[in-house]
Amino acid sequence: MSGKDRLNVFPSRMAMAMMKVRLKGAQKGHSLLKKKADALTLRFRMILKKIIETKVLMGDVMKEASFSLAEAKFTTGDFNHNVLQNVNKAQMKVRTKKDNVAGVMLPIFESYQDGSDSYELTGLSRGGQQIDKLKKNYAKAIQLLVELASLQTSFVTLDEVIKITNRRVNAIEHVIIPRIENTLSYIISELDEREREEFFRLKKIQEKKKKNKKAAEDLKAKRKADGEEKEMDEAPNILNEGMDQDLLFTD
């Protein structure tokens, strides 16, 4: 196992406990990030489907609005200068809000009408029906454009966040967790080796103590045997001395 495949730690019980805590945290983080990536991917696919539907609808609405503009111009002539003279502020405005999706804030755009319509009574004059139809078609087109802009912005934001989240998930799954597991295996193997060495050392010490004890017992037994032999050698001499003294007294 190379040093690049594990963390540089000193093998000890405390280090093993720390690695276990880090491994549990990494696994929990991987699970949460995986769930977040799944939720974002689900929302991403829903937005993609809605974008496709909105673009198809947008084509039909813009086509109808273009035909309405041609009809209005054919009926009433050129009315651009009249519109520009009466416009002093925008009636269609856009406001934004935030949508929280698994911790990701997505911008949502909404269109709304501010103020009254300057051409509210255009239907009473010549070509008014075509102009009224034109306004409704382009108002619908603007709403779809705002909705499409909101969907496209959310799409881009989610795409970037999903890439980042997937990179983090892959990094935790293929780099961080294996490295912590390898470090934990290294610490366990080193501690086991240390325990085997300690057991072997204690066994050697016990064997040495047994040998020393046996040697001491043998030496003690030998000394005891030598002492008994010396006493047996001295006993005849004492008997002879006693017999000589008896003879002297008899004489």
Image (tube, helix red, strand yellow):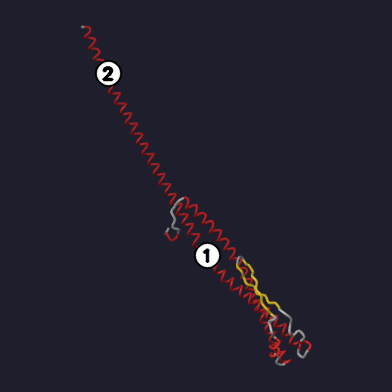
With 146 as the anchor, is 223 left or right in this view? Answer: left
Tell me where residue 107 appears, x and y as whole percent. Answer: 63, 72
Q: Earlier in the sequence, mark 1 or mark 2?
A: 1
Q: Secondary structure at mark 2?
A: helix
How busy is the neighbourhood of tag 2: few (under 14 within 10 Å), some, or many (20 plus)? few
- Name the residue at the front extreme: 88
Q: Which residue is mark 2?
A: 235
**Marks 1/2: CA–CA distance:** 96 Å
Q: Where, quadrant-wise, is the C terminus in this rendering?
A: top left
Picture quadrant of residue 240: top left
Question: Can residue 7 be seen in the rendering of this structure?
Answer: yes
Q: Amino acid at mark 2?
A: Ala
With 102 as the anchor, is 248 left or right in this view? Answer: left
Specify the label residue 47 is tagged with.
Answer: none
Image: 217 above or below 146: above
Image: 184 above or below 164: above
Question: Can residue 53 be seen in the rendering of this structure?
Answer: no
Q: Which residue is mark 1?
A: 170
Image: 222 above or below 65: above
Q: Amino acid at mark 1?
A: Asn
Picture quadrant of residue 217: top left
